[in-house]
Image (tube, rainbow, N blue to C red):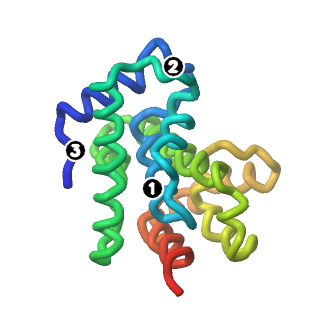
């Protein structure tokens, strides 16, 4: 399943609305949030995703706009599930940015995607840790480091290691499969 240009335009109209906070998730962050919902211990309800993305209630959008948002969530969620069930890597939206000459834009896309994923983790942190804190922390370490959300001394050392950060970027698709299998296989 691919996203239509119209659906992406409708989504961007919502995400870049003046009615949202400046730190609202962008396209990459929303994709990361949905991915966390699919690969994590429990799929998040659409209302929770909306609350994380928009942060305001009632939502300042019309029914057509909200329907486009729901369509986006469904399409991305189903695409991720389909990839996992067929044994394929999840297509990450920032991988398209590799061809972009601006490496800072690519880095910002990865950081945004990872920050969105971590928002999904924070939503149900207790459930994420329910199968073992150590393993969960190990599985999430690359995403946490790439998100830029953590500034402890340990994360600073990791972020300063360009080789390690590059390895984290490279293993991300496999890491997502590992996370999915950890929570969804018996």
Relative placement, left or right, of 146 versus 138 is left
Number of residues whose C-alpha sits closer than 10 Å to that of mark 2, classed few (under 14), some (14–19) or many (20 or more): some
Marks 1 and 2 in Cβ contact (< 8 Å)? no
Q: Position of residue 94 (x, y in %)?
A: 37, 47
Does 114 sit left or right of 174 as displayed? right
Q: Tag 3 or tag 2, which sits nearer the N-term?
A: 3
> Residue at label 2?
20
CA gap between label 1 and label 3 equals 15 Å
Give the residue at mark 3.
Answer: 3
If the image is split into quadrants, where does the N terminus sit?
Answer: bottom left
- Say which of 38 and 70 sits in front: 70
Q: Residue 144, relative to residue 62: is it above or below?
A: below
Farthest residue to the bottom: give it.
186
Q: Residue at x 41, y 26 (%)?
A: 15
* Residue 35 image label: 1
The disc, 1 or 3, on the residue closer to the chain's N-terminal end is 3
Classify mark 3: residues with Cα within 10 Å, few (<14), some (14-19) or many (20+). Answer: few
């Amino acid at each position: 399943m691919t996203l239509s240009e119209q659906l992406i335009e409708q989504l961007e109209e919502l995400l870049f609305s003046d009615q949202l906070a400046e730190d609202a998730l962008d396209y990459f962050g929303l994709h990361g949030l949905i991915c966390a919902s699919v690969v994590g211990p429990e799929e998040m309800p659409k209302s929770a995703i909306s609350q994380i993305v928009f942060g305001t209630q009632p939502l300042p959008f019309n029914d057509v706009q909200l329907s486009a948002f729901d369509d986006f969530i469904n399409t991305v969620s189903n695409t991720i599930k389909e990839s996992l069930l067929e044994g394929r890597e999840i297509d990450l939206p920032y991988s398209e940015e590799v061809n972009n000459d601006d490496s800072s834009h690519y880095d910002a896309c990865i950081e945004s995607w990872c920050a969105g994923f971590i928002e999904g983790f924070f939503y149900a942190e207790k459930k994420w840790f329910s199968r073992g804190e150590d393993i969960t922390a190990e599985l999430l370490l690359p995403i946490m480091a790439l998100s830029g959300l953590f500034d402890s001394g340990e994360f600073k050392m990791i972020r300063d290691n360009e080789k390690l950060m590059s390895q984290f970027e490279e293993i991300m698709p496999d890491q997502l499969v590992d996370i999915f299998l950890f929570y969804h296989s018996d």
